[in-house]
Amino acid sequence: MNFLRRPFSYRNDGVVFWIIGANILVFLADRFFERSLGRGFLVPLLAMIPELVKEGWVWTFLTYMFLHDGVSHIFFNMFALFLFGIQVERQMGSREFLLFYLLTGALAGLFSFGFYAATGDERVALMGASGAIFAVQLAYAVFFPDSIIYIWGILPLRAPVMVLGFTALEVFFMLTGRGGNVARFTHLAGFGFSWLYFLLRFGVNPWRRLTGRR
C-alpha cells in the first residue's frame, strides 16, 4: 500500500497541452493518410478479436484514445480536457496527471472492450479520449466540489452535480440503447477507474468529497 501511495515530486509542465497536441497530430495524420492508422488502434467489433489476440495488438488498449472520428468528436473531447485537465494537473502535478490520464483511459478501453465483446454488441467502435476525459471530470469534481460549471454556457451546476448527472445519463442511454453507437460503457468505466484511483492512490473517498463530507 505504501508503494501505491508513494507520491511523485511535484512539477507542472503543462502535460495537458502535450496530450491535446498529440491528439490533434494523430487526427490530422489519420486524415492525411486516409484512415490508414485505423489498423493500429482499437475497434472492438467481434471480427477484430481474433486479430487482437493473434497479432498481439496490445498497444491498441492505449492508443485507441488518440484516434477520433470526426472534427466534432475531437473538438469536444479536447475542449473538455483543456477546461478540466489544466486545473486537475495543477492539483496533481504533471507526472501524477499523466499516469492518471493514461491508466484510467487504458483500463476503460480494456474493460469496455471485454464488455462489448462479451455482449456481442457490434455497433460500437471504441475510439477517442472520452473514457479518460470522464475520469478527468470526476477528478475535477473531487478536487473542486464547490466549483460552478455552466452547461452550454447558461445552466449553472456545481461540479459534483454535473458529474453525477452525466453518470446518470450514461446509465440511462446504455440501458435503453438510445444515443447511437457511442461507447457509453467506456464513459462509465472512465468514471469507475477514476473513482478507484482516488481510493487506492490517494486514500480519498470521492463520494465524501462530492457530497461535501470532507
Image: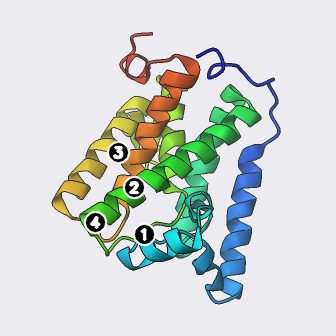
| Amino acid type assigned to the residue bearing label 1 in the image | Pro
| Amino acid type assigned to the residue bearing label 2 in the image | Ser
What kind of element bears circle 3? helix
| Amino acid type assigned to the residue bearing label 3 in the image | Phe
Task: Tell me the quadrant of the picture where the N terminus can be found.
Answer: top right
> How far is the residue under mark 3 from the one under mark 4?
13 Å
**Disc 1: CA contacts within 10 A as few (<14), some (14-19) or many (>=20):** many
> How far is the residue under mark 3 from the one under mark 2?
18 Å
Q: Is residue 168 left or right of residue 34?
A: left
Res 93 label: none
Q: Is residue 10 left or right of residue 41?
A: right
* Nearer to the camera, 89 or 156: 89
Q: Dot 2 corresponds to which residue? A: 112
* Nearer to the camera, 22 or 146: 22
Labels 1 and 2: the sequence-earlier one: 1
Q: Dot 1 corresponds to which residue? A: 44
**Circle 3/circle 2 CB separation < 8 Å:** no
Q: Dot 4 corresponds to which residue? A: 179
Residue 49 point in image, percent of width and height? 43, 72
Residue 111 point in image, percent of width and height? 42, 51
**Circle 1/circle 3 CB separation < 8 Å:** no
**Disc 3: CA contacts within 10 A as few (<14), some (14-19) or many (>=20):** some
